[in-house]
């Protein structure tokens, strides 16, 4: 895991532990989404990973998307349609080994 549950809770300014399992799921999905969009793994051992450790912008991107999942529990409602946060997509584009097009946003 690139981001721990306590790190995400600090980012979200949460003190309650009642949603820790859900937050861990959000982190896992954000990491998988990053990997799928960029063609990179977040493992140290993989060829497309980060052998010197995961860069801070990638950790922030995982926090941004995890926070988005926390805040927006549904893909859309009658009142609003939510897309991936621009900051997440922007970081994905910087670290991509393949094209991350506008459809990612």
Image (cartoon, rainbow, N blue to C red):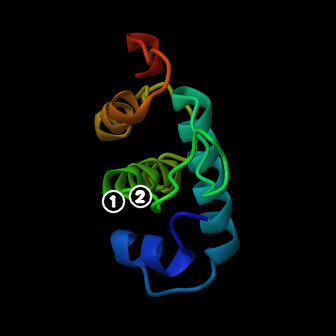
Residue 51: x and y in percent read 52, 56
Percent coordinates x, y for residue 47 in the rendering: 62, 41
Foreground of the two, 88 or 97: 97
Distance from label 1 to label 2 (Cα)?
5 Å
**To which quarter of the image does residue 96 belong?**
top left
- The numbered disc on residue 56 is 1
Q: Residue at x 42, y 28 (%)?
A: 83
Q: Element under label 2?
A: helix
Q: Report the quarter where the N terminus lies.
A: bottom right
Q: Is residue 80 left or right of residue 86?
A: right
Query: In which quadrant of the rendered view does residue 80 lie?
Result: top left
Q: Residues within 10 Å of mark 1 (few under 14, many from 20)?
A: few
Relative side of 38 to 25, left or right: left
Give 16 or 37, whichever is nearer the viewer.
Answer: 37
Q: Position of residue 19 (x, y in %)?
A: 62, 74
- Whether 70 is drawn above or below 85: the answer is below
Q: Residue at x 59, y 85 (%)?
A: 17
Quarter of the C terminus within the rendering:
top left
Mark number, residue 59: 2
Residue 85 or residue 49, whichever sits in front: 49
Q: Secondary structure at mark 1?
A: helix
Residue 99 visible? The answer is yes
Please state the horizontal and vertical placement of residue 95, each as a whole percent of the image.
Answer: 40, 35
Give residue 66's mark: none
Mark 2 crowd level (few <14, some 14–19, many ≥20, 10 Å Cα): some
Cβ atoms at labels 1 and 2 below 8 Å apart: yes
Residue, x 49% and y 25% (percent of image)?
97
Residue 76 visible somewhere in the drawing: no
């Amino acid at each position: 895991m690139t981001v721990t549950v306590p790190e995400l809770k600090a980012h979200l300014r949460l003190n309650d532990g009642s949603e820790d399992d859900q937050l861990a799921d959000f982190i896992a999905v954000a990491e998988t989404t990053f990997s799928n969009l960029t063609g990179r793994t977040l493992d140290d051992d993989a060829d497309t990973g980060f052998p010197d450790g995961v860069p801070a912008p990638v950790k922030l991107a995982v926090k941004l998307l995890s926070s988005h999942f926390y805040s927006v529990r549904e893909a859309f409602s009658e009142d609003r349609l939510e897309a991936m946060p621009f900051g997440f997509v922007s970081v994905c584009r910087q670290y991509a080994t393949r094209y991350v097009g506008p459809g990612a946003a």
